[in-house]
Amino acid sequence: MDSNIGKRRPVEQTVVVERPAAVESTPIIQDKRDESKIIFNYKLLSLVSVGDKLRLVNDELSIDNRYTITRIFSGDNRTDIIKFIYEMVNKTKDLNTSKVFLKQDMQQALIGIKNLGKTYGDDETIQARVELIIRNINNIILTL
């Protein structure tokens, strides 16, 4: 006969821990190298002409003159580049650099970003993202 009959079993208790609501924020720039890369990327964006494609290596943009097949095999694509630029613009708010020079760099980069939009004129999704990037840059420029 089971000696546990009629005895209470311990009740398992579940403890619910409430977590604070997730807050979406762009990480604060903590490294001078990150600031330098962002400034470099704005300067490079100012050089983009219609038809140019971009490449991303170690968080630095470059104008990509490789053949399309090479870009495909290396994994370079417009969606990732535009996403990177969008995130970079959002990080710009946290830069501790000269506001005057940053404003100039961003204004000049707008030309290249618009050219990038013309390059991908057949892609409505990219067009929408480029417009958001331009709007974000203009908003940041107003605050500088």
Image (cartoon, rainbow, N blue to C red):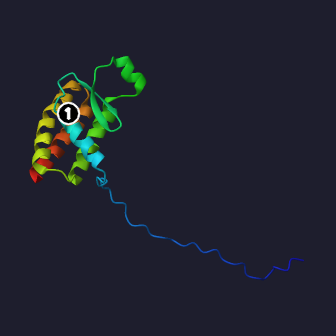
Give the quarter of the image for residue 14. Answer: bottom right
Write the residue at 20% across / 54% down.
96
Write the residue at 23% across / 45% down.
89
Write the residue at 69% across / 78% down.
10
Give the quarter of the image for residue 134. Answer: top left
Q: Is residue 47 left or right of residue 64?
A: left
Q: Residue furthest right?
A: 1
Residue 99 x %, y %: 12, 50
Residue 71 x %, y %: 36, 23
- Looking at the rendering, in which quadrant would you find the N terminus? bottom right
Q: Is residue 35 left or right of residue 74?
A: left
For label 1, the residue is 45
Give the quarter of the image for residue 48. Answer: top left
Label 1 neighbour load within 10 Å: few <14, some 14-19, many 20+? many
What amino acid is labelled 1 in the image? Leu
The foreground one among 63 and 123 is 63
Q: Is residue 94 above or below residue 130?
A: below
Q: Residue furthest bottom?
A: 7
Residue 44 x %, y %: 21, 33
| SS label for mark 1 | helix
Write the residue at 26% across / 33% down.
126
The foreground one among 80 and 10 is 80
Residue 60 x %, y %: 30, 36
Total number of numbered discs in the rendering: 1
